[in-house]
Amino acid sequence: MTAIKTAALTKRYGEDVLAVDGLDLTVEDGEVFGFLGPNGAGKSTTINMLLDFVRPSDGTATVLGLDAQDDTDEIRHRIGVLPEGASVYDRLTAREHLQWVIDTKGTDDDPDALLERVGLTSEDGDRAAGGYSKGMTQRLGFGMALVGDPDLLILDEPSSGLDPTGMQEMREIIQQEADRGTTVFFSSHILGEVEAVCDRIGIMNDGNLVATGTLDDLQGDLDLGAPISLEVATVPDSLALERVEGVRSVSVEGTTITATCADPSVKVDVVERVAATTTVEDIISEDTSLEQLFNTYTNGERAADGDEAEIPAPEVSA
Ligand SMILES: Nc1ncnc2c1ncn2[C@@H]1O[C@H](COP(=O)(O)OP(=O)(O)OP(=O)(O)O)[C@@H](O)[C@H]1O
């Protein structure tokens, strides 16, 4: 089953703003899917259409096989949602918020266990949520999303307002949920977080899905090359690294030699060639980062190629 499926999903605001432009997106059951894009790309609008907070101008969407507009109650019962900028009722305590969701969903969750899971103490749970910091509010919102062991978690910017420890804890919970088979769909600006937990990534730009795939798929498709840098004692005159097969380009800055290789296996040849002529003091080998991919897809370089949406979807085991 697909957890989320949209077909030509479109949202216009007035005459001028095309927030989401004919989106075809599929998220398989059991995936952790990271939804990326710069500000204003259309991520929240998409999520809001999936949750029927916003009505589409055109197209369709299903969530857990149910119609996002017609079967809203059933969908909300089966999913957990952390909306963008989750708001709380100022006078209710955190425990009362959790109990309200537990009662609404008819589950037997223990509010204290949920508080602990999202890093709030029992004392925090007794405080009115109106006095919470942004990060505490986010933790509470996350706890509310976890009520009832949902089949699908939809999280809009889950790290927003969290400190580094909070982000790490949130990542761990996402991983635990994924391990027990929950589908997780979340939007984020934090590329490291997406890199760490996602099976698959979708990049939105200007209302369009410009790329989908695993990080490996996207790296392979863009073919940005595999960089390696070597810190050396002295840069030899007779290096001729360009002659090593598979080396695309070489640059030297001070005592740092950087080579871009056609594929990672060439890096060993680079190291051997350099080590044969000088003392290698350090080696820095990196994969093409998600940041490079993100910039390439969202700065328009890809669009200039004329095939910005043609990355094949990977095989994903559900
Ligand atoms: N209620 C609204 N009325 C008019 N325009 C809107 C409305 N909501 C969103 N937009 C516009 O739709 C576009 C997409 O916005 P959206 O909030 O979906 O982007 P986003 O990718 O979630 O951005 P961010 O990362 O900043 O949250 C933007 O141009 C935004 O200004």
Image (cartoon, grey):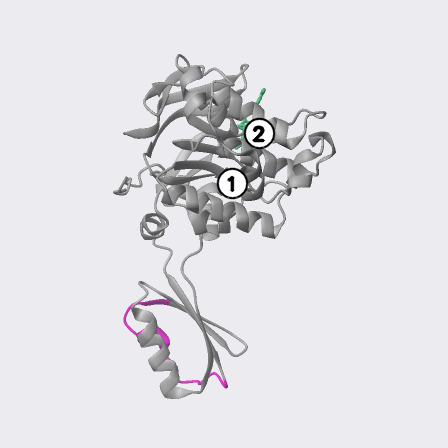
Exactly how many numbered labels are in the figure? 2
Residues marked 1 and 2 touching at CB (< 8 Å): no
Quadrant for residue 318, please give it.
Answer: top left
Whether ligand 1 has any atom under 8 Å from the Cβ at mark 2 is answered as no
Q: Nearer the viewer, residue 188 or 211?
A: 188
The magenta stretch is 233-248
Image location of residue 38, percent across then percent down? 53, 38
Q: Determine which residue is flagged by label 2.
A: 98
Bin the neighbour count of mark 1 within 10 Å (Cα to Cα): few under 14, some 14-19, many 20 and up.
Answer: many
Quadrant for residue 304, please give it.
Answer: top left
Q: Which amino acid does label 1 sit on?
A: Ser
Q: Which amino acid does label 2 sit on?
A: Leu
The verdict on residue 316 being magenta is no
> Which SS class for mark 2?
helix
Q: Determine which residue is flagged by label 1.
A: 188
**Residue 201 seen:** no
Q: In percent of the image, x 54 and y 39: which residue is there?
A: 113
Rendered-image quarter of ligand 1 = top right
Vertical position of residue 82 compared to residue 121: above or below = above
